[in-house]
Image (tube, rainbow, N blue to C red):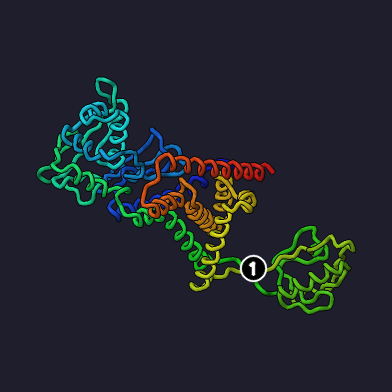
Amino acid sequence: MTAISAIFWGLVVISLLVVLHEGGHFLAARAFGVRVTEFFLGMPCKARISRRSRKYGTEFGVTPILLGGYNRICGMEYLGNDRLGDVLALVQRDGTTTASKVADELGMSYDDAYDDLLTLTDWGSIARTKPSSKDEEGEDVFSTLQRDANLLTMYDKGHDFGSIGTTGAGEARPIDDAAAFCETERARTYEGRSWWQRILLLLAGPAVNIILAFALVIGSLMIVGVEVVSNTNVISGVDEGGLAYRAGLRGGDAIVEVAGTPTDTWQAISDTLDAQFQAAEPFELVYERDGARHTVEIDLPSDGSVTAIGVYATTEWYHASFPQAVMVASSYVLMVAKTVAELIVPTHTVEIVSQSSSVVGISVMASQAASAGAADFIQLLAAVSLSLGFMNLLPIPPLDGGKILIEVVQAVRRKRLSLRAQSIISYVGLGFFLFIFVFALFNDVTRIIG
């Protein structure tokens, strides 16, 4: 049951935060008029449950691999060359085609033709049939999409398939100006937006996680509150078997004097006891119960091994004001940001990773937090959301921060990085995060077994 609880609450936390993260990217893409063909909870998988939105054309769904989520934002996987316009016009003219036919008619290599068709598919400009649907030679078939009178697809804002002039999927729809039509299609993709819009789109996912965490911390401090020590000399309880318990103290007693020093607050009790622990000598303690005072002797050993007599402070729930909650939340956000940033500083990497948790550790903590109550669960949700947000901002591909770094480099160079260079950088980034995952997983297993 413990394992089932950990799996359940781990999936709840991770799925919720990932969906919100991807939702940030989705909303930003739609705001900039960028097509989004898929929005899924879970990692890519053939087995899926989904439904296509009539308004956005996006296929929303869930897969069995509930370890994340993803958007397919059109134009993020650029493979094409300068013949894209010609290839798109050819597909529009014929309705359906294959890479071989495109290569023969345009005098291209088969690989270039296939890459162009894949790029146009990624743009949401044409469609590739399912792998089981091949032509007579066994090739993938590419076809036109349904378009309204204004050439808008189901992925575009304002499409109206009830208008006169609408053509169906797979039907021929010749284009007069191939270059202009190709640029119009490019403008509806990630690739076709300005560099600052692309950066905002990439920032949107982490921003949602950080803003959510900030709001959760503020809401928790103001509504749920936080348990704080009451500065009173009344104790809430004692450790059974501890020095205070053996001396006769019980919860509800008021400690009024320690070693001859009056103690009317918890701070005074704490300070006076600390002094006695350093002296490591027996002392007298006076407590009050039901209006009567009692004097007992606390027999501290002389070796200084005892640093507590086993009494607990009385606590109360404190509800912060809005300014106080904002101040605490801001400090917390800055602390997490600093910790995550140190992850890429070689002198701190191992130290930070050794304190990190993998999906396993998060699942266990989520189960424990859910059992402890709403306040603990909200705090965990905020912590994981912050970590997810700031981790994604690290300048390491294929994270959002890494993609932002590539966009900045390309803007400075005024030239896109080659696919080979981007692939190499991404593989290095994946290797780094595989190291972090394995290290964090080892830490979690060690802690759980321990």
| Residue 422 screen position, x and y as percent | 43, 43
Q: Position of residue 16 (x, y in %)?
A: 45, 50
Picture quadrant of residue 411: bottom left
Q: Nearer the viewer, residue 92 or 273?
A: 92
Left/right of residue 254 with respect to residue 71 in the rendered view: right
Q: Residues within 10 Å of mark 1 (few under 14, many from 20)?
A: some
Looking at the rendered structure, the secondary structure element under dot 1 is strand
Q: Position of residue 63 (x, y in %)?
A: 41, 38
Q: Amino acid at mark 1?
A: Thr
Please report the residue visible at 53 percent of the width from the left and 56 percent of the height from the top.
383
Residue 51 found in image quarter? top left
Q: Quadrant of residue 170?
A: top left
Q: Is residue 445 above or below residue 317?
A: above
Residue 16 visible in the current orientation = no
User: Residue at left 34%, top 41%?
Assistant: 78
Identified at 55% across, 55% down, the residue is 340
Residue where numbered disc 1 is placed: 315
Query: At which x and y percent is residue 134?
Result: 27, 24
Quadrant in which the N terminus is drawn: top right
Quadrant where the C terminus is found in the figure: top right
Q: Residue furthest top?
A: 136
- In front of the other: 99 or 380: 99
Closer to us: 223 or 333: 333
- Position of residue 94 relative to residue 74, above or below, is above
Q: How many marks?
A: 1
**Residue in the picture at 78% in, 67% down:** 249
- Vertical comparison of 404 with 418: above or below: below
Can residue 252 be seen by looking at this rendering?
yes
